[in-house]
Structures are given as C-alpha cells and as structure tokens.
Image (cartoon, rainbow, N blue to C red):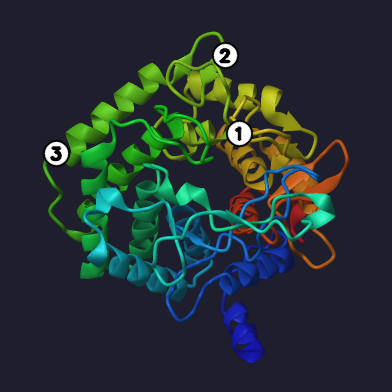
Amino acid sequence: MALHSRRWVQELELPSVKPSLVRRSALVLRALVHEPTGAVLAAPTTSLPEGIGGTRNWDYRYCWLRDASMTVNALVDLGSTAEAAGFLGWLGRILEHAPGPEWLHPLYSVTGAPLSTEAVIDSLPGYAGSRPVRIGNAADHQVQLDVFGPVAELIHGVSSRTGGLEDEHWDLMVQMAAAVLARWQEPDHGIWEARRPPRHHVYTKVMCWVTLDRALRTAARHGRAPDPSWEPTARTIREEVLREGWDDSAASYTVAYDSPDLDAAVLHIGLSGLLDVTDQRFLDTVTAVERELRVGPTVFRYRYDDGLPGLEGGFHICTTWLIEAYVAVGRIEEAWDLFDQLVNLFGPTGLLPEEYDPSTETHLGNHPQAYSHLGFIRCARILDRHKPEAKRT
C-alpha cells in the first residue's frame, strides 16, 4: 500500500506553491477514500469537539455527497481521476435504489446504506471532557438541496480533464439536474446542517444554479442534448438569488432570504460564476465577510444563533474560500497573506483539522478533515498562477 501510494503521489501534477503540503493533503484525501466501494469519508474520526467541553461533537465517518464530490474533484485537479470514477460509480449504485434523485440523503455509510439513528455513548468521557460522544449523524434526515451542485461540478471537471464524457456520468448529470428541477424552490437545512427549521439558503440556491449551469456546459462541450427546461430554470434561479439573497442592511448577500445574517458560504455567489466577480455586490460581500467573519488567520462560518449551545472555531474551508475570493477580486497580496497564515496552522504531521480557535490558538473538530485539505489544495493551485518570485517554494 505504501509503495502504491508513493507511486500514485509521484504522478500528481503538483503546483510549485507548497508542493510538499499539497502532496501531503492529496495523500490525506486519498486515504479517506473507501477503496472497496468508492465512498469518501468527511473525516476518519467522531466527536472531536468544535469547542472544548461543548456539545458540538459530531460523527464524520460517513460519506457526504457534497464533501465527497469536492474531495475527489480536488484530486482530479491534480491529475488523478480514479477516485472520482470510483465515487461516481458508488453514487450511481445508490441512485439505482433511490425513489428518485431528488430524494438523495445528504450522507450515507460507505456501503451506501442510510444511517441508523444518531446515538450517544454515555459511558465515554469525550475528548477533554467534551460530551456527548456520538455515533451516527442526524443530518442524514435533513433536506440539503445544495448537494447536487458539487456532483455536477465534479462530472464537469472529470469530463474537462479527460476530454470525454462517460454515458453513465452523463446519466448522473441528468439526474442531478432533474433533482434541481423538482425541488429547487423548497427551503432546506443548508450546507451547515443547522438544526432549526428549513430556510431558503442562498448557498443552496447558488448550487442549484451551478447544477444546471454545469449540465448545460457539459452538454455543449460533449454534444449531448440538454433538457429544454434547464436554461430557463437556471436563469430563473439566478435572478431570484440576486434579488432575494441581497440584504441592504448588511450590504452583502446573506445566509438566507429575508435574513441580515452573514455566512461565509455566500462567497460562492461569485466563486461559482453566478455573479461576475467585478460586480460591486460581490465586492461588497467579500468585504462584509472579511469584516464580520474573519479573525486573524481564520474565517468563521457565521455568527448567528444556529439553535445549538456553545461556541465553535473558525472553519479552515471558509478561510480557503476567502483566499479564493481575494484572488477573484484582485486582492492578491491579501490572498497570499491569509494563505501564509493558514500554512502556519498545519501541524508537524502536515494535517489540518476542521477548525481553529484564534482566541486560544487551539485546533478543533474532527481530524484530519477533507474540507480543510481540499480547500488548501485549491488555494495552492490558484496562487500558483499569481505568485511573485519570492513565493516559488
């Protein structure tokens, strides 16, 4: 296995920015792939706390459709497509037994089975006294309508990298688009799985648009026939998001319609291509996220009440999104500065957890985290195209 991994990593197309850490991150992502099935874990641990002594202790040893798609897509970007093929095969098998693509769960076990009920092991004290220790994840029962977007992005990415489009991958794309057509107008629980009533989350709507946009692009590139409703529905979603997602009091796009609360995930309104990155509304959104959610080397998901007690740290993947946004709007020096601060948070093993608490300088959450490493890989590749001479190692 070790020899196989060494050979695999030697064949990756690494950026010249922090290649050793990118290599390490790629190995982490590959190690999260369950080879017998193709499923991908969000993290290999459970119940490592998002706040020491708190109750935000979740079980991440499952395959989230969103996280897994983003994970293998990062490997596609580095030149390895086998993991993506394995995951898409796994997803195809799940869809064979699903009542319809619009009824996909947000996450599954590696075998593709739905999860059992979330449970607590009372006999275990938890990390640093952080209880409860959980088995299973109740987010399995949530409605998360953004998950189709990363799958569509992955299929588009694989076909772009290989220059061809497998029939089964096109079938998956069509199913993702069908799911969006069926349910995009519904409220949902969103990317952060808030344990509160569903809302019209801006990030979710953006990902519904991404699904149809990437389906249209993939069809055009590979000579496939798009569904005639894709383009007008994508246009309708985009117009609604731009209109309903903006909040004048926040001077930003926000977490959900009719809410002034900020959410780092709304940076995707520009990063996805839905809104031009030179548009003043995106520039203002980047400024708002920076002002309200960035603390030193980290970016918090949000500051609003999510219905759970206790605090959490900044999320490394949110930090990488702000780095990407800085680059997108031309703030290259600030992108490099924040990237360098993120690099300094890597442990001696080259691993990143989910979160970082800037007040106590403590690493938090499940470890290592796919999100954190895939976000880092994305930033290293982007900054590789924007590097001064001093940044070539």
For marks 2 and 3, the one nearer the N-term is 3
Measured along the vertical axis of the image, is residue 244 above or below residue 97? above
Measured along the vertical axis of the image, is residue 8 above or below residue 218? below
Q: Nearer the viewer, mark 1 or mark 3?
A: 3
Measured along the vertical axis of the image, is residue 212 above or below residue 251? below
Which quadrant of the structure image shows residue 14? bottom right
Q: Nearer the viewer, mark 1 or mark 2?
A: 2
Q: Which residue is mark 3?
A: 229
- Element type where label 1 sits in the image: loop
Q: Residues within 10 Å of mark 1 (few under 14, many from 20)?
A: some
Q: Residues within 10 Å of mark 2 (few under 14, many from 20)?
A: some
Q: Which residue is mark 2?
A: 250
Q: 118 left or right of 292?
A: left
Give the Cα separation between the discs numbered 1 and 3.
Answer: 35 Å
Q: Where does residue 246 sit, x and y in percent of width and height?
A: 45, 17
Please state which amino acid type lies under the numbered disc 3: Ser
Q: Quadrant of the C terminus?
A: bottom right
- Element type where label 2 sits in the image: loop
Residue 330 is tagged as: 1
Q: 111 left or right of 340?
A: left
For marks 1 and 2, the one nearer the N-term is 2
For marks 1 and 3, the one nearer the N-term is 3
Give the Cα separation between the discs numbered 1 and 2.
Answer: 23 Å
Q: Residues within 10 Å of mark 3 (few under 14, many from 20)?
A: few
Q: 36 left or right of 251?
A: left
- Decide: marks 1, 2 in contact (CB < 8 A)? no
- Decide: marks 1, 3 in contact (CB < 8 A)? no
